[in-house]
Image (spheres, rainbow, N blue to C red):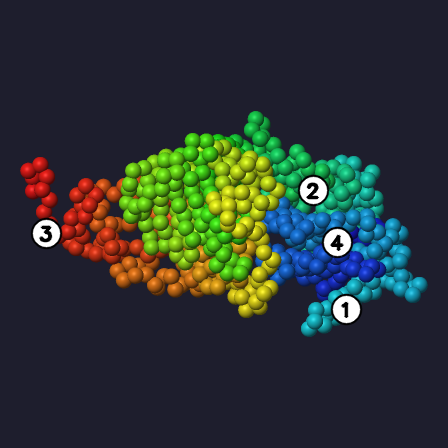
Amino acid sequence: CSTWGNFHFKTFDGDIFSFPGLCNYIFASHCNTPYEDFNIQIRRIVVENAPTINLITMKLEGVAVELTKDAVMINSNRVQLPYSKSGIMIKKSSIYMKVASKMGIVLIWNEDDSIMLELNEKYANQTCGLCGDSNGLQIYNEFYSNNIKMTALQFGNMHKMDGPTEHCEDSTSTLPDNCTDHFDDICQKTLTSYAFAECNDLVDVREYIMICQDDLCRSEESKNASCICDTFAEYSRQCAHAGGHPLNWRTSKLCPKKCPYNMQYWECGSPCADTCTNPKQSQFCEEHCMDGCFCPPGKSLWSVFDDINNSGCIPHQQCSCVYNGNTYATGTSFSEQCRSCTCNGGQWNCQDLSCPGTCSVEGGSHISTYDKKHYDHHGDCFYVLSKDCKDETFAILIELRRCYPTKTCLKTVTLNVNKGQTRSFCFSSVANVTVFRPSTFFIIMQTNFGVHLEIQIIPIMQVFVRLDPIFRDQTCGLCGNFNNIQTDDFKAISGIIEGTATAFANTWKTQASCPSGQGSFENVCTLSIDNEKYAQHWCGLLTESKGPFADCHYAVPPIVYHMNCMYDTCNCEMSEDCLCAALSSYVRACAAKGIQLHGWRTDVCSKYTMSCPKSLSYSYTISSCQPTCRSLSEPDVTCNIKFVPVDGCTCVNGTYMDESGKCVPANECPCYYRGSPILFGEVVHENGLV
């Protein structure tokens, strides 16, 4: 079904009629069934004596779509094109806007006078509106009411659909009759010309010649001759829809078209235009051709449209690439933690680099393995979190304890080195392990053999482990075996791969007398309406499209973090502490991707920004060592350690942290000699020197 030009319509069954209505009308709808799959309505206005379609509203399986020349709205929300969601795809070409639904509905609008609607044959004899009933019979039954044939005017007015507060008068316009003899034969000459030779065998041209002649009659009255161009264009579209290939019928004097950039106008080109972001789209296109502006074929270089920089048609070898919202010219590259990528003619060529493994225990029960497998374990014992099962270089033990009926808390983290020897030390560098606090919220353990731990202690304890690639495929424990295969992460201490997280985790207890842990509890949010509302409100910030965490959504999907946040916040005795720990976990994951989220504590978890010890201040991003008194006397080994940026309280500019954790001016710092503090005024004697 289609409509075009000077109020012309062609029904699904092939009837062509004219109806000059300027109200809102049902173009086509699903009827005679219990459920309405679709409802499409249109509205025209007259601009400079020419009718134009200014509004299309569609209801597609409950989704409201509104099209205007300036915007596309989905359920009253403005969206950017191309759009693809809920089984609806909307995209634009040089001339047309196309809406396609998974139900088998395709609407093509030229953003001016023309709409073409294609329906799946399953809707035969189930449609209403100006497009008719799609029963395969012309005239019957859409143009009959109580066995009386209606005029086009009566038929059109019958499908008027006023808004709730609107009262649009029925159209009463009549069309001129018997004036075709006063004009030359431009209509017949054009529509039967060589350009449409193939089309004349596919689409009956006689009615279009008559419509064209009617257009000429009306153009005499309206002083607008462009309407005959609309009918020529419609015949071309109908030809293409029937499988034909109309040739260029436009000339510099007859309905000329101008194209932007360095594009060319063709009457029959692929609707799947090749672009920098989709350079081979036309090769897989099964749609009929359509008119529009296209890139000219290159003589030696393949030409595509530059939809990245909007610079027109270029050889595809000159296409830029896009990553994380940034544009890279061909030949340029970027590197990140695990790969290096170079832009080559719009395509990324990436090389994987040796990548460290990361494992975490968050919220006391949410565990993520080196191979990115997520599971929950509610334990009540000491467990092997991770160990080098080949050379026994290290072992990381954790203590999980029941701290609420359905809540587990992480109580301790132990790093064993040298085949099981446990060392106790203050925040300093001892043997092959360095321990320090970059902020009051975190403790960092760095070894010289490739094991790195970040332990969060405020608001609750959480641990993040990073292993160098040298340990690949030789670890065991709750963190898995670090071999890039998730399916074997539940390998028990016996070597058997367990089917459940609970059975797997219980094999890694270090004390046989401990009770066995549990996997997941039921939805604890249902136990308290107040807790559920609190969690829904504050955890919902993670997924808000314009919330404080939205800038990271493209890099770190928030779904898993939102689920963990809901569980922990509903389940925790101190709901705010668990909420803030869950939110900070997402912030840390973003920081690991190079995305710093500032200001997220403005409306939530703000108490931690105002509770710093005296002489310290809160910072969202701490990515280097603390300014310490020790660093004034001797090199601070912690300043060479790289870690994921953290937040917390740290010394303000111009002050240094002493051994007691207090920030003091430099003149109040002790000196250090061979790692030991020497208080102001003390004297050191060595080898005759004072």
Seen as rendered, the residue at the extreme right is 147
Q: Nearer the viewer, mark 3 or mark 2?
A: 3
Front residue of this view, candidates 455 and 85: 455
Mark 4 burial class by Cα count in 10 Å: few <14, some 14-19, many 20+: many
Task: Please give left or right for residue 17 compared with residue 97 in the image.
Answer: right
Q: Amino acid at mark 2?
A: Met
Q: Do labels 1 and 4 touch, CB within 8 Å? A: no
Q: Is residue 403 left or right of residue 456?
A: right
Q: Which residue is mark 1?
A: 170
Q: Are marks 2 and 4 in contact (CB under 8 Å)?
A: no
The Cα–Cα distance between marks 2 and 1, rounded to whole angstroms, is: 35 Å
Q: Amino acid at mark 4?
A: Thr
Q: Label 1 to label 4, Cα distance in Å?
A: 19 Å
x%, y% of residue 671?
16, 48
Give the residue number, with chain letter if any, for mark 3. 681
Q: Which mark is residue 105?
A: none
Q: Amino acid at mark 1?
A: Asp
The residue to which callout 4 is attached is: 3
Question: Of the residues under marks 2 and 4, which one precedes in the sequence?
Answer: 4
Q: Residue at x 40, y 63 (%)?
A: 606
Identity of the residue furthest to the front in this view: 513
Nearer the viewer's eye, disc 3 or disc 4?
A: 3
Give the label on residue 290, or none.
2
Q: Residues within 10 Å of mark 1 (few under 14, many from 20)?
A: some
Q: Distance from label 3 to label 1 (Cα)?
A: 101 Å
Give the spatial CA distance, label 3 vs label 2. 90 Å
